[in-house]
Amino acid sequence: MNRAVRLGSLEQLGQSVPQASIRANYERWKSLGVGKTAVVTGANAGLGFFASLGLAAAGAHVILACRNQSRAEKAMAAIRRRVPEASVEFMQFDAASALSAMALAAELRGRQLDILVANAGMIHTPSTREAGALGYEQTMTTNVIGHARLVGELAEKFKEGQLRLITLGSMSTLLMRTDPKNLKLEHDYNPYRAYVQSKAVLQSMGIGLDHRLRQLQWPSRSVAVHPGYSVSGLTPVIEEINEPDFAKRLTGRLQGSFAQGKHEGSVAIVEAALTEGLERCAPGVFFGPQWTSKGRITLARPANVTRSKVLQDAAWEILIQANEGVDPFAL
């Protein structure tokens, strides 16, 4: 019996090494999305836009789940200009709202669903603590709790078919310590800490869910991803989607030795969504760049804290709280 694959090149799964950018992988992904429906939250810009572009180019029907319909429509138009045969659709989703998560789940429950990318989130976090849901601050609410409710509402989908959930972690989880005892940041609030801890919790929740799905013997997978250090200043200009000013372009060039564009960082998302041979991976699979901040996509090693029982238990408790005290994946 072959041992489960944990770390290293995707070649272990029978795959070649992916190219650096979304556009360069069109041929690699060609037809892998045909017949599949993918939902990408926060798909109107950044990583979400480029992941949607890659999935559409692969033949998937892509639902852009966004807060702002006007921006989503501009993103869909930009995708169609690049992939004329793209099948795209808008659905309303505000990641900071449990009601919005419930409404989106109600729309999706009767639809085919093969890929769910939990991408929407807050990058520019509040300078001072702002109250959010369930006693947490606003960043945790937006980046984690809304998605936790959406996933919980769609739990039956994980049982019915081979759904892939993609949770967006961050390399920042390797750079700053996460305190599982202070996830509400009721003291020692810092905007960067709020971002890091929210990403650590989402990443840990995704890893923990993959283990739980294996225990339940359900056919779906939960794949955690981090996109490296991806900045708009190194991302191609796309009108009304990515239009960095001179300062961002200059900063991007100065960081070029260790940073990449979002059209490159999003390759990890699409690979996690479409890679064949995922059944060979051990539970808790994690996709990320070989050199942490950039590089070819590999099966990477997540931050130790996100694999720890302490944080995974805390993340699972948030999942339960977000679903009104019910464990949607109870053993």
Image (tube, rainbow, N blue to C red):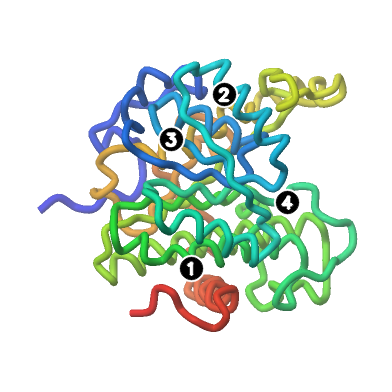
From the image, tell me which residue sits under label 2.
79
Whichever of labels 3 and 2 marks the residue nearer the N terminus, that label is: 3
Which residue corresponds to the image point at 40% horizontal and 33% vertical from the top-left?
Answer: 60
Whichever of labels 2 and 4 marks the residue nearer the N terminus, that label is: 2
Location of residue 35 in the rendering, given as x and y in whole percent from the top left corner: 32, 35
Q: Within the image, what quadrant is residue 214 found in?
A: bottom left
- Comparing 251 with 33, the one in front is 33
In the rendered view of the protein, which quadrant contains the C terminus? bottom left
Q: Are marks 3 and 4 in contact (CB under 8 Å)?
A: no
Crowding at dot 2, Cα within 10 Å, few <14 / some 14-19 / many 20+, comes out as many
Q: Residue 94, relative to residue 48: is it above or below? A: below
Whichever of labels 1 and 4 marks the residue nearer the N terminus, that label is: 4
Separation of residues labelled 1 and 3 (CA atoms): 23 Å
Give the number of marks: 4
Tag nearer the camera, 3 or 4 = 3
From the image, tell me which residue sits under label 1.
152
